[in-house]
Amino acid sequence: MVLSPADVTDSTMNVSGVVQTADGAGVAGLMVSLYLNDVYQAATLTNADGTFSYALARPDPGTYTVGAVWAGDSQYLAAADRVDVTIAAPAKAATALTLSLNPKSANPSTTVAITGKLVSGTTPIGSAMVTLSADYGDVDNIVATGADGTFAAMMSFPDAPDFPASFTVTASFAGDEVYEGSTITATGAITAPATPTPSLTPTPTPTASALAPVPNDSSTPVDAATSNGVFLQTVDARWATVRMVFMVVALVGLGAVIILGIISHDHKKLARDERRGFGTDFGQEH
């Protein structure tokens, strides 16, 4: 008996051989038993030319010993043969990762959303473990992909006064018995927090007394509109003062006229009374 090397396909391991006499003639109709690592698998009959073949289920990857045995009978002696066969692991499908950071530019007080997807060609890979790492910041170490191949995690930064200008996140899929592994990186920027804008204090409106003319020299330019406004306000203030003085003078003059009138009236009355008394007593004897 001569056993040929096994022919391994994606799903089967084909075992074949021939049973011959000493002069090389094939023997038909013999029952040949097949073994895998000395464990019985199946039996098959030889053809008219003494050949036989049988398709065993493909075993897991590894090295095996295939055996074929003819037990013999009253006409032919027993015969057997063995061959070793190695079952290689099937070719793994290539994979690819995508990775996104939002926002791409952050400051130590913010968090960054990490999202990505694991695919093989156009096929999403679900229930896969993706490892995340960062050269600066804190992020979940392992996340699982959903049925659509996507994954997500949140990243934060330590509360420290010093920080680098950028950070890098790495996502890795180690692979399994079906898929190859893959890795991808994404880089973001770290900026200092914005400085709060100070609130503006309203400037008080100047009073009329503060609107005095401002002296100016040749070295200090003065806005024309501002200068004219100050001048007009100054003129108005001075004119108001003049009107007030005029009113005071008028009131004083009017008071003086009234007083003089009263005095003049009294003098005239006294004079009349004196004349009347003189006329009554004139020519009378005393």
Image (cartoon, rainbow, N blue to C red):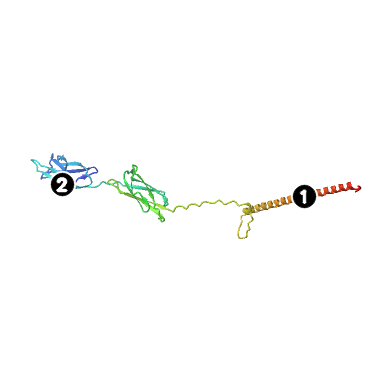
Residue 48 placement (x, y as % from top left): 14, 39
Q: Earlier in the sequence, mark 1 or mark 2?
A: 2
Residue 55 or residue 231, whichever sits in front: 231
Residue 7 visible (yes or no): yes
In the displayed structure, does residue 234 sit left or right of residue 275? left
Dot 1 amino acid type: Ile
Q: Secondary structure at mark 2?
A: strand
Residue at 70 percent across and 51 percent down: it is 244
Query: Quarter-wise, where is residue 7 in the image?
Result: top left
Residue 58 location (% of width, % of height): 22, 43
Q: Locate the N terminus by quadrant.
A: top left
In what element is the residue under mark 1?
helix
**Residue depicted at x 15% and y 46%:** 82
Pair 1/2: label in front: 1
Q: Amino acid at mark 2?
A: Arg
Q: In front here: 62 or 255? A: 255
Q: Are marks 1 and 2 in contact (CB under 8 Å)?
A: no
**Residue 85 shows which numbered tag?**
none
* Residue ranking furthest to the left: 74
Viewer-closest of 184 and 49: 184
x%, y% of residue 72? 10, 42
Whether residue 101 appears in this view of the structure is no
Using the image as rendered, state which of residue 52 and residue 98 is in the foreground: 98
241 horizontally vs 105: left or right: right
Residue 31 relative to residue 237: left or right: left
Q: Residues within 10 Å of mark 1 (few under 14, many from 20)?
A: few
According to the image, label 2 marks what residue?
82
Residue most toward the front? 286
**Rounded to the nearest whole Å, what is the CA distance between mark 1 and mark 2?**
157 Å
According to the image, label 1 marks what residue? 259
Task: Where is residue 143? Give x, y as percent.
Answer: 33, 46
